[in-house]
Amino acid sequence: MEDVKVNGTLIWYYYICKREVWLMAHNLTPDQDNQYIDLGRFIHENSYAREKKEISLGNIKVDVINKKNGHVLVGEVKKSSRFIESAKMQLAYYLWELKKHGIEGTGILMFPKEHKREEIILTEELIKELKDVEKDILRIIYEPKPCAPEKNKYCRNCAYNEFCWA
């Protein structure tokens, strides 16, 4: 396996299911006909149309980025706040990666269906947690096979459901 870099998607899945981290990192594509993947794509493509979309820097791809009065604001669009912890850590990871490139900013999680926003500020505590998570993700990725599936509250709607439970 070639040298893998941690990205925001792997951070997101780490907080939902460690098995998904391994599957995504090994390019095992989830069911693309899954209704929740389709809904997520639709919301992503049709929300915040006036904002810039998908800016890539290194191994990160942010949904929305704005600069106002010298301040960088990074936005991440999610279909619901159900995965708020994953979303928070994914956005914190983006802020940390930008900081490594000398760009300081704050983040905003946007949940258009809920008309809700949440500000994310990168703290030293978040950076420490992200460093630990990054190491653990790399450990998971370099395992020869994925860990056994473990039922959690997200399995029912997961695009890997059949892969794990068929």
Image (cartoon, rainbow, N blue to C red):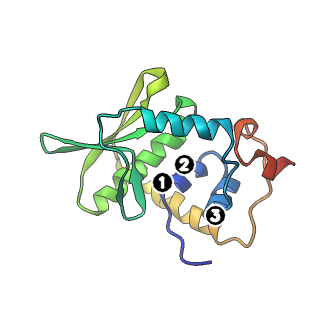
- What is the C-alpha distance between the residues marked 2 and 3? 16 Å
Tell me which amino acid carries mark 2. Answer: Trp
Q: Residue at x 59, y 50 (%)?
A: 13
* Mark with earlier residue (1, 3): 1
Which secondary structure, mark 1?
helix
Q: Residue at x 36, y 32 (%)?
A: 48
Q: Quadrant of residue 76?
A: top left
Q: Which residue is mark 1?
A: 8
Residue 9 lies, in percent from the top left, at: 53, 53
The reply to whether callout 1 and callout 3 are in contact (CB within 8 Å) is no
Q: Which residue is mark 2?
A: 12
The image quadrant where one finds the N terminus is bottom right
Q: Nearer the viewer, residue 122 or 8?
A: 8
Q: Nearer the viewer, residue 147 or 26?
A: 26
Q: In this picture, is 2 found above or below 89? A: below
Q: Give left or right: position of 24 versus 85.
A: right
Residue 49 lies, in percent from the top left, at: 34, 34
Q: In this picture, is 143 found above or below 37? A: below
The residue at the far right in this view is: 166
* Mark with earlier residue (2, 3): 2
Q: Which residue is mark 3?
A: 27
- What is the C-alpha distance between the residues marked 2 and 1? 6 Å
